Amino acid sequence: MKRTIFPCILLGAFFFIYALPQYAQNIAWPQFRGINCSGIADANQDPPINFGKDQNMIWNTNLSTGQSSPCIWQDNIFITGFEEEEKLLNMYCIDRISGAIQWQKEISVKEFEKVHVISSPANATPATDGERVVFYFSSYGLLCYDMNGEKQWEMKMPIPKSRHGMGTSPVISGDLVIMNCFGHENDPCLLTINKYNGETVWRYSWPIEEGERADSYSTPVIYKNQIIIYRSADVSAYDVKTGNQVWRFLTGLGVGDAVCTPVIGNDIVYVTVFSTIGNTEVRAQFPDFAGLVSKYDENQDRLITLEELGGFEFNNSPEKGAEISSVIKASKWARHFDHNKDNYIDSTEWASMIEYCESDYLKQGIKAFRVGGEGDIIFSNFIWGESDHVPHVTSPLFYNDRVYMVKSGGIVSCFRAEEGELLYNERIGTAGAYFASPIAVNGRILFSSRTGVITVVEAGDQMNILARNDLDEVIAATPAIVDNKLYVRTANSLYAFGD
Ligand SMILES: [Ca+2]
Ligand SMILES: [Ca+2]
């Protein structure tokens, strides 16, 4: 069922032709998820559909653990890793043709940033413009090297305070390195840095408003002269020259995890907004008050205390699989709904919690809105939204006028991009968690499961699975495609596949 809190406004598509970035002619996948975080390979690329350790593998190079994606320029691949015991952060430059390590740098730190069990101190994908490469480690800061591995500059940063650890990656646009630090709870800001010397150009500090929380795992997206960032309360745009906020699209969730990186297609922004407590998997686990009493009223006084609720636990994402999904105590949430603070949750208070979940469900989901305007653009620019099927971590993919999403469980949704019509919502047959974002090449889409299966699906209005390729290693990083080859970072390896 299609549900949304917003009016559905259909707008015509606006097609702008603007100059391709200079690296479009080069062999380049220069940052997280390729050019402008789109996840779309250059036209005419044709990597193998079937691949694996025994099929179409060109090379495989062992790396230290990490989940940054490959950053590629011509014959160089830049990638990171870390060594837990030694407290080392590793930066690699790998020869794209042979897989040999060309140079390797390491930084020793006293401590790593505290990160979520599914995250990593080597999370951020490097960014390059073909003359330099910028690495970001939340436990250290930014480091810039030239292509030969000579250090150009560095910007140390305090270890950020955040819920799950930084998820963002730097990007290079024009003369600037752009860093989304909106997820630093202690000092949420957007930073631009002179890529030649490492000096700060401007800094936009987030004036946190009531009901908002500094939170953002998103990588910046560039649209003309604007930097677009997804934060917990909004998707907002900043003038690349001045650092002024130009517009903001309120997502409705003031305290949600802003995890995905939005994508832009035909001047429409697509963003997936996820609420832990609003998602259908969680809501299905909540009984009504009578059900609550029959199950958790230990002393049988027909009343429920917060302590009695301690026995009620729910899984915040059963589809991720037992290994990494979190079990949450209902009392943790219910405490906020004990409005009269008497330590009992009565039927009205329980109902208000269910209502809150329902309201978060209506606020969450994929949202499509027209890019542009000034100030608050939620009512003027909103096009369509859909509460169901929303992933927690992966980013949406805009490809050939369709939008694709994959959520844990291997559940793929495909929408008509402009209208929001759901074309299909189906399981691709590999369950478990999905953290890598989908990418597209030559009429095909690649979905990578954490368990290491890369499913190749034909782009289009029906699901048509072309291949399932099992690497049998953990994949959390989004793969990269250049030069008819596919590059996949697993927990401890980098693979190159090609015919
Ligand atoms: Ca009781
Ligand atoms: Ca109460």
Image (cartoon, rainbow, N blue to C red):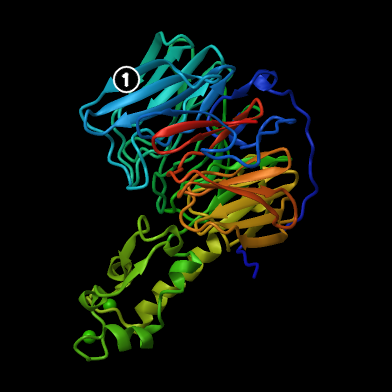
Query: How many labels, in total?
Result: 1
130 versus 321 height, above or below: above
Q: Residue at x 37, y 58 (%)?
A: 325
Q: Residue at x 35, y 30 (%)?
A: 64
Left or right for 166, reference 377:
left
> In which quadrant will I find the N terminus?
bottom right
Return the x and y of residue 204 as percentages of the image width and height.
Answer: 45, 30
Q: Is residue 262 visible?
A: yes
Q: Amino acid at mark 1?
A: Glu
Mark 1 lies on residue: 106
363 versus 95 height, above or below: below
487 versus 468 height, above or below: above
Q: Is residue 242 visible?
A: no
Return the x and y of residue 416 as percentages of the image width and height.
Answer: 74, 54
> In which quadrant will I find the C terminus?
top right
Left or right for 497, reference 133:
right
- Cβ of mark 1 under 8 A from ligand 2: no
The quarter of the rendering in which ligand 1 is drawn is: bottom left
Identify which residue, 209 or 41, lies in the foreground.
41
Residue that extends furthest to the bottom in the rendered view of this protein = 301
Left or right for 195, reference 155:
right
Identify which residue, 477 or 367, lies in the foreground.
477
